[in-house]
Amino acid sequence: MGLLFPVGEEGDEPLYRRVRRGLEEAILAGRFEGRRLPSSRDLAAELGVSRNTVNLAYQELITDGVVIARERSGHVVNEELTARRVTDPAAPDAPGWLARLEPPPGAAELPHIRKPTDWDGYPYAFVTGHLPSEAFPERAWLRSLREALQGEHRRFSLQDGIDADDPLLAEVICREILAARGIAAGPDRVLVTVGSQQGLHLVAGALVREGSRVLVENPGYPDARHILARAGAALVPGEVDDGGLIVDERLLDVELAVTTPTHHYPSNVTMSGQRRQRLVALARERGIVLVEDDYDTELRFVGRASPALASLDPDAVIYLGSFSKFLAPGLRLGFVSGPPALIEHLRDLRRYTIRHPSGHQQRALALLIASGEYRRGVRHLRDAMRRRWERTVEAVRLHLPDWAMRPRAGGVSVWIGGPHGLDTRELAARLEPRGVLIEPGDTFFFASPGTGGGPIPRHWIKLGFGALAPERISEGVAVIADETKRMLG
Ligand SMILES: Cc1ncc(COP(=O)(O)O)c(C=O)c1O
């Protein structure tokens, strides 16, 4: 048991009163909701006081009606009292918290991606957004961090850049990353961000007004929907098929469209060349701004990723880059590339939120990329992910032969559809005690696909393999198959 509360500083107040106060505060904070209060023996041992002291504290709380003594089951909280405190309409809500903290309109109803933070304690964690920690190029990163504090680099690591980025990182991103995606850009077209999430947030802050119509893919990335809805966007669902985002009439009256052309999130479909041409042509013709989220382009296992959508027209397409998928999501590093006027505007918005991402991290990342270690790390990661991808595809074919699956050429997950009637949310709840975590697919839809209305599909799973040891994959998929069989009888 962790320490429930500190006993407080020694002073004039007797020890048992301090214990009583700590207990009362913990009760009112809801720390004992749904569980019994500790026995006087356990609490005395934990706080390092005598049982007598604890008994005295409990006695006072019983007298005041905060605690009830139950025969055999010990002390419990007087729920009547705590319920009244929370719900009493006469209770003063002094600064009016409830009214002040209204959920953002438009975002309140959207589902969130939820994953247990202790995912790495599960033997079969089919989750995305995490990489095996051994994949991180630790020695090269430490070397870069150290070098970034030496000689000519030191100034850029430590100074207040106000609204500027590390010039070396901006240059290296243009030379090594954007060029490889077919985008010819100079540093005036790059803004470094705290992950691509901040990139989209800044873009939304600059371009989305209350009621702006913004097209997002359906199914698609829930966090993008949250960011845009919080900026006031009216979201328009864009359909996706085997050629990627469908270019149809839904695009005609939107101001902005956000897409994941390299690997559609969550299905990993790659947008066809023809679609790309049509999308960019339509965007030019109708004045639609396209946002390309190129979050995991390097994780390509068959062939090579086609050039970015932004390479077709870097003035009509805003490009979002992320280092979360190839380095570590916890470093929070990404960038935006777009026309210089937009980048200047985003720079101003960024200045008055975070000024700039850490100079030290920016310089270290620049040195890592310039030394070739970043490329080496990406190749290594790609090989490690390819092995997992192959095993996952094999395991699904073996254990879930009647499920829908089109293995795509990249990504860190496969999108698989169980029999209609299967509720993968319920499946996820039943799998968790068996050590298997899955991501139910309904979270990624915000409208029924197709034009016919109807409920959101509940039979899909985004089966992430990135964080799982390859030898565990088949066993884990077998458990999913077994539990599905039990559920469907
Ligand atoms: C579709 C998509 N875009 C972007 C990101 C990366 O965001 P960030 O760079 O903020 O970590 C992710 C990561 O999960 C993602 O799935």
Image (tube, helix red, strand yellow):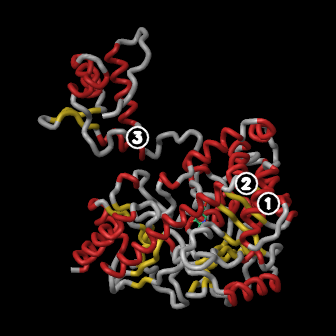
Q: Which residue does the image show at 30% across and 59% down from the upper left?
A: 435
Horizontal side of residue 472 vs 349, given as left or right: left
Kind of residue indicated by mark 2: Ala
Q: For the residue labelled by badge 3, is the local secondary structure a helix, a strand or a loop? A: helix
The mark closer to the camera, 3 or 2, is 2
Position of 183 relative to 62 (above/below): below
At 47% from the left edge and 64% from the top edge, which residue is drawn?
466
**Residue 197 visible in the displayed image:** no
CB within 8 Å, label 3 to label 2: no
Dots 1, 2 in contact, CB < 8 A:
no
> In x, y percent, where is residue 50?
24, 16
Q: Residues within 10 Å of mark 2 (few under 14, many from 20)?
A: some
Image coords of residue 376 (percent x, y): 61, 59
Mark 3, mark 1: which one is toward the viewer? 1
User: In x, y percent, where is residue 467?
Assistant: 44, 60
Q: In which quarter of the image is the N terminus?
A: top left
Q: Which residue is drawn at 66% across and 60% down?
A: 196
Residue lying at the far top of the rendered structure:
12
Q: How far apart are marks 1 and 2 (CA)?
A: 17 Å
**Residue 63 visible in the shown view:** yes
Quadrant location of the C terminus? bottom left
**What label sits on residue 190 in the rendered view?**
1
Which residue bears the numbered disc 2? 370
| In the image: residue 49, left or right of residue 111 | left
Q: In which quarter of the image is residue 473?
A: bottom left
